[in-house]
Image: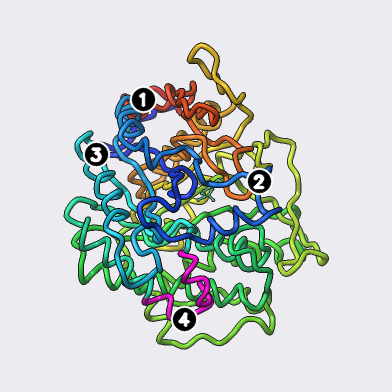
Amino acid sequence: MSQPVQFPNGFLWGSATSAYQIEGSPLADGAGPSIWQRFAHTPGMMHSGDTGDIACDHYRRMESDVALMRELGMQAYRFSVSWSRVLPEGKGKINPKGLDFYERLVDTLLANNITPLLTLYHWDLPAALDDRGGWLNPDIAHWFADYGSVLYRKLDDRVKFWATLNEPWVVTDGGYLHGALAPGHRSRYEAPIASHNLLRAHGAAVQAYRADGKHKVGIVVNLEPKYPASDSAEDLAAVKRADAYMNRQYLDPVFFGTYPDELREIFGDAWPEWPAADMDLIKQPTDFLGVNYYTRNVTRHDAANYPLKTAAVKQHATYTETGWEVFPQGLTDTLAWVKDRYGNPPVYITENGSAFYDPPTAEDGVLDDPLRVNYQKKHLRAVHAAIAQGCDVRGYMAWSLLDNLEWSLGFSKRFGIVHVDFATQKRTPKTSARHYSQVIATNGRSLGTT
Ligand code: BGC
């Protein structure tokens, strides 16, 4: 029987962004360069030579952007802090003006009744730390925890939700294995080390939070369910590898203190023995899990694909501009999997959204984006279905508030529910933003029935 959609009382509705993707002015007021500043300024790395030098100019337009969030009825805002604005060398001397920007952002959000969700690391490592080996240097666990403490001490009286890392899988896969993202390395030998140090840094930052913070701390992972292309033994084994690599590689250590066995098979001689003490450091109790969900993958065996030996099988379905299948059921399945495997932790959907083609300029203040509205509606219903099955989902952050720099794809992919005209910086809420405002105002009832 169909049921009216109704989210639990207190469900937190908001949107998300990250520092390098929206702020611009990356070197302003004493900030140090990040690896993305360097990467974007290296010829050939970015689509059309795009950079984050201006992006959405949010660093200078923060107040009006928060006013826009309020106008849309947002209850929460997930943003990230640029490590090298706060600590230009990555450690040591604090840059007061950098810290001040985030303090003003938090105060402006609170003055507008918007709950801040702060992410410490959304991929923009200080370049000075990359010069010391970046995520390959084991000392990074302490550098990261010390950076966290600077922020906890300054802002924990006002920020109640802290995330350590955003998507460690992407940091490693894009940054150290395949090289499409900063710092652009391609090494099967480096990837496991970077992953492990990311997880150690997460553990150390959670420990530091328990010393300096009083609220909630967690990690944000991207989860992409893997479905077998056939029931052949080869395809089923391929699914296990793909799932271990992308989904369990980070959550098993955080929740159980162990790595999935398949990683040894995938990385072969590049997979080291890890000290038991490291696994204890990683397995710190957390208060919530942030889940980023975009798509699923139908997986088959493919011996030619390095190092996973898997390939994706294209479906008869709608695909987004980033080539991702629209598959809302995957979100329900993912949340159910998290509940069953990891003991139903409190979950926030920290990102979900889609890039579809939108024109560069909005005409007469209108930007109609029916495919994005459809994506949003179906995924919100999928979240509701998971809650109805007993998943402890407590909030949803749309990715993204604004069209922004889609990393090495530059400004060519628009994920915003608010359109940005990059020539004028004019913001125009798309139909999807208006649709989302209605969902928020009715706590989901405007989504109709299931
Ligand atoms: C990242 C965002 C990115 C989005 C769309 C996520 O992997 O956290 O920074 O823009 O997906 O690709």
Labels 3 and 1: the sequence-earlier one:
3
Spatial distance from mark 4 to mark 2, Cα to Cα?
Answer: 33 Å
Label 4 crowd bin: few (<14), some (14–19), many (20+), radius 10 Å? some
Label 2 crowd bin: few (<14), some (14–19), many (20+), radius 10 Å? some
Residue stretch in magenta: 126-142
- The residue singled out by tag 3 in the image is 108
- In the rendered view, tell whether residue 380 sits above or below residue 93: above
- The residue singled out by tag 4 in the image is 138
- Quadrant occupied by the N terminus: top left
Q: Is residue 448 visible?
A: no
Residue 49, which numbered label?
A: 2
Check whether the beta carbons of the residues at disc 4 and disc 2 lie within 8 A of each other.
Answer: no
Quarter holding residue 318: top right
Spatial distance from mark 3 to mark 1, Cα to Cα?
Answer: 29 Å
Spatial distance from mark 2 to mark 3, Cα to Cα?
Answer: 33 Å
The answer to which of 173 and 268 lies nearer the viewer is 173
Residue sitting at x 64%, y 57%: 42
| Helix, strand or loop under label 2 | helix
| Helix, strand or loop under label 4 | loop
